[in-house]
Image: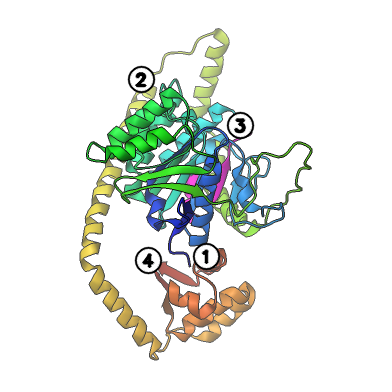
Amino acid sequence: MKRELELGKRINGQRFLLPFDLVTRTLAIIAIRGWGKTVAATVLAEEMCEAGLPWVALDPVGVWWGLRVNPDGTPGGYPVVVVGGEHGDLPLEKSRGPEIADALLEENVSCVIDLSGESKSTWRHFLTEFCERLLELRPVVPRHIFIEEAPEFVPQKPLGEQKRSLAAVDRLIRLGRNWGYGATLISQRFATIQKDVLTQCENLLAGRSIGKHDRDAARDWIAEVVGQTESEKKAGKFMESLVSLESGVGWFWSPQWLNEFAQVRVRGRKTYHPGETRTVGQAAKQIALSDVREFVGRLRTVLDRKQRPSQVHTAVPSLAVRKGQAAEAAASSAGALPRPTPEEDRLRAENQMLRAQNADLHRQLGQVKAALDAVRKVVEPEYRAMQKLFVELDAAGAASGADAAVFEPWKARLGDGPAKMIDALLSRGGELTKHQLSTLSGYSISSSTFDAYLSRLRRNGLIETQNNLVRLRVP
């Protein structure tokens, strides 16, 4: 299993590695068109896939689906679900951002949201509601959010609906780490990203940048994030080289988290890059995506379940709704909408009050979580010691309370992989850590297969999981 994420190599040839903690950190990747920004971002996504760290990419460019394809165009790559776009496994619906956020966190799947076939209005509406919903949820497994074409959502001068998308991304960047989210903003220019959001990004990967306004914005990031105590020599070296950096070579600067300042050559992708420049006269590759039907099926099941209440409501609207619709239609034909009734004003006020109460409850839950985290740090050593003791007792011969014969029909029904996991749990008293289960069943804990078999057992009520423990349940 990978222990670190490999972005590429330093100029001296040494591997440049980043901790897994990058998944909950903030990064800005900024360089002119053609430098390799998407390559750098997808390299990090590849590394996260291999490490078992889930992520989501919001992709208005329409190239991230290539993570499902080998470099030569044959099926391969990583088990990533694509929503929307020409290669979508599921259609993209403008209003379903919150439901997709729910489903992705519930099923723990990496996903590309391909926005390339939609209008910019749809981009912003979907991203806004998706990010707002993420911050209402607490993921069991931390995850990273990649945002291509960041200035479309967090522009220097927001207008209209851009104000909502700016507020949503700003909250994700500022508060996401508290709830288990990290984010990467990807842009061609420093100057077009809203300054307050950019300076909240604690890490920077900067490639070639030639405009004066962009270099001025880069100086602002240095002044705000690096601070006055940092060596002026580094800042001078950084600014002088921005204009001449070759493609794929950039500065990774992490002044606070890693205390790192290094020039890095980003490694090549292990998957297909649809945006790669093709030589004139060269034939286009025949592309075939890898099969992720199992993951798509899991997501579709969750999405269908979450859609039913809204469908019922839409199919049979209440009398009040029907009256309101009729009144609006009549007023529209007359050229103006009627003034709200006292009852409508009362309902609107109650709705606003409930929203405020809901926001307050979320803040209180955040405070409780912080207190619980502090308690956990204090008692965790004792908990780990007791956990190890009980695992050793089970391994020494503690008998399982479950009758193995009960599970035989399930083993035959679910297949070899889940059957091996059931046998491993039965052999050790019905409870194992995930690492022990991985060793005994023969499936790597970082593989998608391991997660898929666990999910299958959980859906059928045969196991329950708590943190790193897996317990067998009698069906």
**Residue type highlighted by circle 2:** Pro
Q: Earlier in the sequence, mark 3 or mark 2?
A: 3
The residue that mark 2 highlights is 342
**Residue type highlighted by circle 4:** Asn
Q: Earlier in the sequence, mark 4 or mark 3?
A: 3
Q: CA distance from mark 4 to mark 2?
A: 51 Å
253 with respect to 145 (left or right): left
Image position, residue 102 (x, y; %): 47, 48
Residue 118, disc: 3
Tell whether label 1 touches label 3 (CB within 8 Å): no
370 with respect to 204 (left or right): left
**Numbered range of the magenta stretch:** 101-118
195 with respect to 61 (left or right): left
The residue that mark 4 highlights is 467
Residue 451, disc: 1
Q: Is residue 2 above or below residue 219?
A: below
Which mark's residue is nearer the viewer, 1 or 2?
1
